Amino acid sequence: MLATELGLQLARRGHEVHFISYDRPFRFDAPQERVNFHKVQVVEYPLFQYPPYSLALTSRMVEVATEVGLDILHVHYAVPHAASAYMAKQMLNGNIKVVTTLHGTDITLVGSNPSYMPITRYSLENSDGITAVSEYLRKETVETFAVTKPITVIYNFVDTAKFHRIARAKGKRKYAPHGEKIVMHLSNFRPVKRIGDVVEIFARVRKDVPAKLLLVGDGPDRNIAEQHVRDHGIERDVHFLGKQQAVVELYSISDAYLLPSETESFGLSALEAMSCEVPVVATSVGGLPEVVVHSETGFLCSLGDIDEMAEAVKLILSDDSRWKTMGKAARERAISHFNINDVTAKYEEYYQTLLGR
């Protein structure tokens, strides 16, 4: 998503942008001036159990770079894109710069796997520039891969003009017909998100504060969440909404955002919630302390401490004045530290430095 939004924003600022991927990028659903899409065709051969996407990607990078005269190949996620970009650069006789942006699982999960660690380290060291979306991820990359090349932290961003609280957002009465407070969680329901903790925390909150829980997204741990809901007998208070596109409407009717993750390289959903004036209760792990300011834009709690997180949510829901103050502070932080215009300008400056302009 960041790559798509960044590319579209750069195009609006006058740059020629070319997306190279196996599928049209998410949120790239309308033609835009100076934006181009080049599909990577992956041919399946009986000889291979898995189609060689990395090689097809490399070939497409070379074709596009040669055809349109690219200055920079900016790849997102080290595996496999940085390796493909490195090979493309060699085929182009070095006449292009490669920037690799690290997002999280490409380093902490996939890249650190023994099967991928050597190629990941080599690809990073041979990138012309490396950026990471948080200071936490920068340090994690250096420690895991012993990378000697400098890594620049350029935070994830949010389009604060798009992600803002809608005063008369629809759905509040649908989910909370009697004026109950609404707690929201959005994720891919993987184990790292600790979706069971979300339900356990909400069950404790609900004992003291009339509330509803919106679970947005889907994934492998949905069944676990559903079982927790049944165990607590709170089926009427928990809404499984599946994957949603119009998330701003959902943020806008929410009173607290809950993110008890085991780790987060940044915490983009927390930032989106903050931009919509929703106080965040999250674990104090990974890059989340760089996004959420404890006791100001929400609360940061110990990993796995369900009681502590429940108390934090109740503090927000039971005091309208605190909720309003935290919500305003969250919005102000999103604008001052993470808005899309400022972050895009930082990428522009980074590109220009890399090109020696």
Image: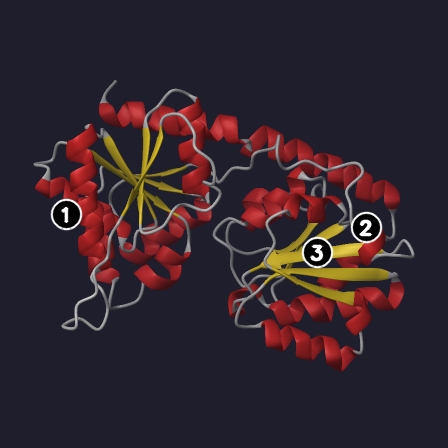
Q: Is residue 225 left or right of residue 318?
A: left
Q: Which mark is residue 184?
A: 3
What number is the disc on residue 172?
2
Q: Nearer the viewer, mark 2 or mark 1?
A: 2
Residue ID at (23%, 54%): 121
Mark in the foreground, 3 or 2:
2
Q: Identify the image quadrant of residue 20.
A: top left
| Residue 267 coordinates in the image, percent (x, y) | 54, 50
Give the mark nearer the N terminus: 3 vs 1.
1
Give how far apart the Cα atoms at labels 2 and 1 are. 52 Å
Look at mark 1 in the image and give the residue it sits on: 87
* Above or below, 118 relative to 36: below
| Amino acid type, mark 1 | Met
* Rendered location of residue 90, percent (x, y): 10, 42
> Toward which corner of the image does residue 346 lie, by quadrant?
top left
| Mark 2 residue crowding within 10 angstroms, few (<14) / some (14–19) / many (20+) | some
Sequence order check, earlier mark of 3 and 2: 2
Asked whether the beta carbons under mark 3 and mark 2 sit within 8 Å of each other, the answer is no
